[in-house]
Amino acid sequence: MKKSIRTLFPLLLAIGLFLSACSAESAYTLDSIPDYSDSPYVTVNNNLPYFSDADLKTTSFESYSDLDGLGRCGVAYACVSTDTMPTEERGSIGQIKPSGWQTVKYDSVDGKYLYNRCHLIGYQLTAENANEKNLITGTRYLNVDGMLPFENMVADYIKETGNHVLYRVTPIFDGNNLVASGVLMEAESVEDKGNGICFSVFCYNIQPGITIDYATGVSALATSNTAGSIESAAPKTASADTNTEKSIEQIYILNTNTHKFHYPSCSCVEDIKDSNKQTYTGSREDLIVQGYEPCGQCKP
């Protein structure tokens, strides 16, 4: 008996997504990335995503690559809409250990923790929380300065228009390195053919002032000596009382737009838009590792 078109559609869609993702990977390599120069990202392909007109459909979907033989994430691809956004409170992701993960702290890093568990496609867009296929080892700088502004831009656009946005994030690894050198982020609004959202950027997975061994994730504080070369100082490892897995769980209120977290009793909570407000039960350290910052007023 012949299979119906309805039965074949999921398979055909999956094949199409795979081929489209492969074309983006083949079109962009580390060789085409300029050296980091003070900006957390650089535009790619004249800021135009590698989508074809045929890719721009108003059907919501999500697709996450299987981990490779080294446990590394691949392409995360979605058509984001109000249908894919969160409808329930965010949970913990501390149990996920992406490739190259290290729990290490530096006084020079905002929030202390060098590495965050970075969502390839942000939680506010697809509600994917502890999905190991969507989490990489990313610096605080990558997460907050590089990726978050683009995630907020897309989320705000969708909430305001109700339109769809084709969205793809590709982690770029050099050889067998366990930590990505950065991520290629592409997005294009569907209904208005890119008039609302259209970007193609590479975000650097670096942390100013810190040297990183991308093969393993091991890091050190970078200091310049008089000869101009770089020397390394040992980082601080997280102590037992601040270890994510051993921290006390509490209830916090998150602002998914500003990436601040508050005590429920904080007066700032009343000013958070309902669309940006989420209740979270977990540890303070876990939130910081996820890229959130404590409120300066209630100081959670």
Image (cartoon, rainbow, N blue to C red):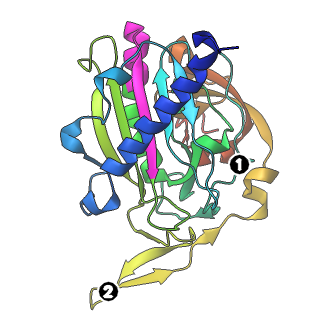
Which quadrant is the C terminus positioned in?
Answer: top right
Q: Secondary structure at mark 1?
A: loop
Relative to 261, is 284 on the left or the right? right
Q: As displayed, is residue 174 above or below residue 60?
A: below
Residue nearest the viewer, comparing 170 with 179: 170
Q: As displayed, is residue 229 above or below residue 240?
A: below
Which quadrant is the N terminus positioned in?
Answer: top right
Q: Secondary structure at mark 2?
A: loop
Q: Residues within 10 Å of mark 1 (few under 14, many from 20)?
A: some
Magenta-colored span: 154-171
Q: Quadrant of residue 154?
A: top left
The disc at residue 96 is 1
Residue 159 colored magenta? yes
Relative to 254, is 205 on the left or the right? left
The disc at residue 185 is none
User: Given the image, on which type of amino acid does mark 1 rest?
Assistant: Ile
Which residue, as the protein is rendered here, is positioned at the far bottom?
227
The label nearer to you, 2 versus 1, is 1
Q: Residue at x 49, y 52 (%)?
A: 140
Residue nearest the viewer, comparing 105 with 159: 159
Q: As displayed, is residue 2 above or below residue 22?
A: above
Q: Residue at x 43, y 44 (%)?
A: 22
- Residue designated by label 2: 229
Q: Position of residue 173 (x, y in %)?
A: 46, 60
Asked whether the viewer can see residue 212, the reply is yes
Q: Position of residue 265 (x, y in %)?
A: 67, 22
Q: Position of residue 158 (x, y in %)?
A: 41, 15
